[in-house]
Amino acid sequence: MYIYYTPLNTAIRRTVLTSGCEPLKKYLRTRGKPPSGVNALDEEFDEFNKEPTATDVEVGYLLRDASASGTLDLSDKKFSKVPLEFWPRDSMVDKLQVLDLAKNGLALIPFDIGLCVNLHTLVLDDNLLETLPSSIASLGLLHTLRLRKNNLAEAAFDHVLSQGTPLSCRVKELDVRNNALRFVPSGVVHLTSLQTLLLSYNAIAQLENIDWSRLQSLYVLSISDNKLVSLGNLYQSPNLTSLSVENNNLNQIPGEFGLMKLKTLAMNGNPQRTVRLATINKGIDEVLLFLRNKLTPSEIEAFSNKPTQLSPASPMEVEAKVPLMKTSTRPVVGATSFTSRPPVAPTGAPPLPSQQRESAVDDVVATTITASSVDLRIASLSEQLEDHGLSAAKRYALKKDLAKARAEKIRESRSKTTN
């Protein structure tokens, strides 16, 4: 074969041109398949430019590494199903602790995943899953289950989050963000060790189907970017410290949330008018204080008498609560002593018998009413200051009245201490 100087030979390396006919023909065969109908050799692959496939190179490396480290990372391999050559071998099943199958096109997870008895982290994010194998419930050491960005509905968890399974006693983190949930899976109440529950970016509208008081270990709950119109009895979660309900359809925030142990509460992006933005911007302590002031003393007492354990109230919280005192075993006396006063004896005359009997009761009731009125006035003035439409003069006057009310409360507290 002779190739003279033409534009063609500028596209072929000189080392190929000078190495002889057979190497040149072999190189040309790597440039593409022969035309149809031509009796020619099949296309060859350039050993210098060939892209190594996962089957040729990665299988042995990944499995050897997993056998040594206990971690099998098969993320972003664009699988439609888990190839058999990748699935854990008998020699590796007992050693595997972390399995990452994220960012593939998986529609099913093999049932044999239940053989990985020492697995403690399973990552199935960003796939096409609509169901889960029930064998996951048998993984007694699994503490992290991540299922973000799939097509899972609540029915997919019926056999996975069953009561009394090894999984229910161990799992601490459940990530089900970006799925097709319309309700919180009812089986989460069986997860006695669950600490973190992530439910954002679903279509959940209500939380009434869950008894949150049973989740004694739950600390973090994210249910933002859903369709929530109600928070149900979520305030009964005994140890919840971080809650995100942003970007929902909530019209109100129950006052009982002010009695929780929350350290973080994110609720922007809702049509609720319970808590003003100015209060939200002041921080979690101000928000909880504002919500507590929405409750009546009887509601606070009823909440405190529930079996859930509450943290001791801080001095600021105690001061903000309206006192609830038992003034007399005869409520008629306490109720009428300020509406229709008993007869008053003339000046210089000894007090009437009825006045002697009720003087002590009246003193206690008067103290209670006065303290309650001061607290209520402080709460009322604070709420009025939340109005963004106040003029500068009106805001100044309200702040002045609020300062006077607080000073009056301090004087009363000091007088009680002195007495």
Image (cartoon, grey):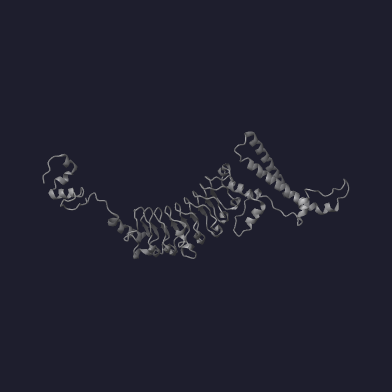
Residues 390 and 150: in front is 150
Q: Is residue 255 left or right of residue 323?
A: left
* Residue, far right: 349
Residues 324 and 203: in front is 203
Q: Residue 286: x, y in percent?
A: 59, 46
Q: Is residue 352 left or right of residue 145?
A: right
* Residue 69 in sight in this render: yes
The answer to which quarter of the image holds residue 4 is top left
Q: Residue 332: x, y in percent?
A: 77, 54
* Residue in the picture at 55% in, 60% down: 214
Q: How many marks?
A: 0
| Residue 347 to residue 194: above or below | above
Q: Residue 203: x, y in percent?
A: 48, 51
* Residue in the picture at 44% in, 57% down: 145
* Residue in the picture at 56% in, 54% down: 234
Q: Residue 109: x, y in percent?
A: 38, 59
* Residue, far front: 37
The answer to which quarter of the image holds residue 130 is bottom left
Q: Is residue 290 left or right of residue 89?
A: right
The answer to which quarter of the image holds residue 407 is top right
* Residue 413 in sight in this render: no
| Residue 29 to residue 5: above or below | below
